[in-house]
Amino acid sequence: GNSVTQMEGPVTLSEEAFLTINCTYTATGYPSLFWYVQYPGEGLQLLLKATKADDKGSNKGFEATYRKETTSFHLEKGSVQVSDSAVYFCASLSNTGNQFYFGTGTSLTVIP
Amino acid sequence: DAGVIQSPRHEVTEMGQEVTLRCKPISGHNSLFWYRQTMMRGLELLIYFNNNVPIDDSGMPEDRFSAKMPNASFSTLKIQPSEPRDSAVYFCASRTTGLYEQYFGPGTRLTVT
């Protein structure tokens, strides 16, 4: 079946540090992959996406590359800011269905 | 576009009372999803509709929960009777079928005392 596993948090980093949040997926076929971000008190917002192998999604300095060989979609940012403090969710969408599969979320706190 | 609209934003009720949460999806979207988020269980899919028809309700916790989508622009999630363990943030999301992302509403924070 389909599922998404992401790195457990919480993660605490100093401003300008490098960020990696790991995400791996299991799926039948080739799903589309997403990273969503949830700021305190708000709903989830799409951060970036990739729809096929080797695609790189990027937005606001965040990047993730769709790696079919390792079934991974790790989120990275070279220099985090305090405003990046949020919960990050990895998700997959089967190319045959309509259902999203979300990871458990990783809480990130960036301290000045 | 106003985005996905949910009401109320906050609801506090006593155990045993009926609670109705409302959602207006983005115009033109044909799929609607209800999620529940708690610290213990994370984000859980409760039910989703495609073209107003319930497709998968396997995530609905029990018979106390019911959801309807009478038309393309409105859905409700009802809990009757409510219990303290139903306290959570309930999100509605909508999308267009295909390789497109979901758009989430701001959520309804439900507290059952």
Image (spheres, coloured by chain):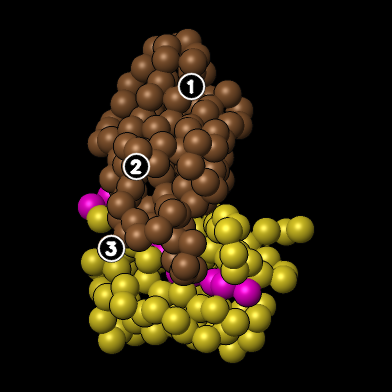
Chain colours: A brown, B yellow
Residue segment shown in magenta: B30-40
Q: Position of residue A87 (x, y in %)?
A: 41, 38
Res. A86 image quadrant: top left
In the image, what residue type sits under mark 2?
A: Thr
Q: Is disc 2 surrounded by few (<14), some (14 to 19) or many (20+) residues within 10 Å?
A: some
Query: For numbered disc 2, what is the local secondary structure?
Result: loop
Instruction: State whether residue A93 appears in this view.
Output: yes
Query: For numbered disc 1, what is the local secondary structure?
Result: strand
Q: Quadrant of the C terminus of chain B?
A: bottom left
Please give the chain letter of the residue carrying mark 1.
Answer: A
Does residue B52 lie above or below A4 as drawn?
below
Residue at figure coordinates x 50%, y 14% from the top left = A79
Residue at figure coordinates x 57%, y 72% from the top left = B31
Whether discs 3 and 1 lie on one chain: the answer is: yes
Lower position in the chain sequence, tag 2 or tag 1: 2
Residue at figure coordinates x 72%, y 70% from the top left = B27
Task: Check if mark 3's residue and mark 2's residue have beta carbons within 8 Å.
Answer: no
| Residue A1, label in figure | 3
Which is the main secondary structure of the residues drawn in magenta?
strand
Task: Check if mark 3's residue and mark 1's residue have beta carbons within 8 Å.
Answer: no
In the image, what residue type sits under mark 3?
A: Gly
| Residue A77, label in figure | 1
In the image, what residue type sits under mark 1?
A: Lys
Q: Position of residue B91 (x, y in %)?
A: 47, 62
| Residue A71, label in figure | 2
Q: Is disc 1 surrounded by few (<14), some (14 to 19) or many (20+) residues within 10 Å?
A: many
Query: For numbered disc 3, what is the local secondary structure?
Result: loop
Measure the alpha-carbon separation of dots 3 and 1: 30 Å
As drawn, is B17 to the left or to the right of B2? left
The nearer-to-camera label among 3 and 1 is 3
Please give the chain letter of the residue carrying mark 3.
Answer: A
| Residue B14, label in figure | none
